[in-house]
Amino acid sequence: MKDKVCLGAITGSYGVRGEARVKSFCADPSAIGDYGTLTDDEGRTYTLTVTRPVKGGYAVRLSGVKSKEAADGLRGQKLWAPRSALPELPDDEYYYSDLIGITAVDTGGETLGRIHAVHDHGAGDILELRPIKGPGTILVPFTQAVVPTVDLAARRVVIDPPAGLFDDSDEDDDAPKS
C-alpha cells in the first residue's frame, strides 16, 4: 500500500445514531477529516466528518454509515488516504509509512534487518525490526541517539544500538571470573 497512508483506525461505534469512534494517527489528530475520501482495509470509501473529541479519539460521521450496528461492524478497520492527499515534507522529515520495509544497518554498515512497523505507545516511538539473524522481532527506541540517520533515498536507517540489543552475550564475558 505504498500509494496510501494510514491515518487512523475505527475503534467502534459512538452513540446510537451511526457515529463511529476513530483513533487518529495524524500529527494534528483532529485533521483526520481533512484529507478527502478515505478507504478502509476492505476497499470501501468514506467521507469522514469529525463531530467532537471523545475519550480515546474522535466521534466521526462516515458517509453511508447510518446505524450503531453498522459502525460497530467496522471496528478494527484502518482508514487510508491516498499519498497524494498528504502535504509534501521538507527533506529532513518523513512519514512513518516510508520507513516500513527499509534496511536497518549498524554504525559499521552491517545489515541488522528490516523495519516491519513503527509503534507509538505515548512515551516515544519504537521501531519493530525483523532481524536477519534469528526469528522474531527486536524493538528499537526511535530516538536520535539510537537511530542517528534516516536515509530514505538509500532506503536505510543507521542504528547505534544499546549494548545487548542485538546479541545475547553479556557485556562482562571478557571480565575475569572470581
Image: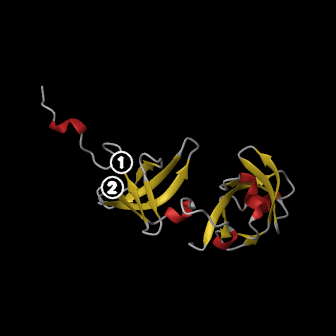
The type of colouring in the image is secondary structure
Q: Which residue is mark 2?
A: 106
Which of the two discs, 2 and 1, labels the residue nearer the N terminus?
Answer: 2
Outermost residue toward the front?
91
Q: In what quadrant of the picture does the N terminus appear?
A: bottom right
Tell me which corner region of the image, top left, top right, bottom left or bottom right, holds residue 94: bottom right
Residue 63 is marked as none
Is residue 50 depicted above or below 174 in this figure? below
What is the CA distance from the residue labelled 2 to the residue labelled 1?
Answer: 7 Å
The image shows residue 23 at horizontal and vertical percentages of: 69, 53
Is residue 43 depicted above or below 9 in this figure? below
**Identity, as a three-letter code, of the amino acid under mark 2:** Asp
Tell me which corner region of the image, top left, top right, bottom left or bottom right, holds residue 128: bottom left
Q: Is residue 63 left or right of residue 175?
A: right
Label 1: which secondary element: loop
The image shows residue 35 at horizontal and vertical percentages of: 74, 66
Q: Residues within 10 Å of mark 2 (few under 14, many from 20)?
A: some
Q: Residue at x 84, y 61 (%)?
A: 67
The image shows residue 37 at horizontal and vertical percentages of: 75, 71
Q: How many marks?
A: 2
Q: Is residue 177 left or right of residue 96?
A: left
Q: Residue at x 38, y 56 (%)?
A: 136
Q: Is the C-beta separation of discs 2 and 1 under 8 Å?
A: yes
Q: Is residue 150 left or right of residue 34?
A: left
Q: Residue at x 50, y 58 (%)?
A: 117
In front of the other: 37 or 60: 37
Q: In what quadrant of the picture does the C terminus appear?
A: top left
**Identity, as a three-letter code, of the amino acid under mark 1:** Pro
Q: Which residue is mark 1?
A: 161
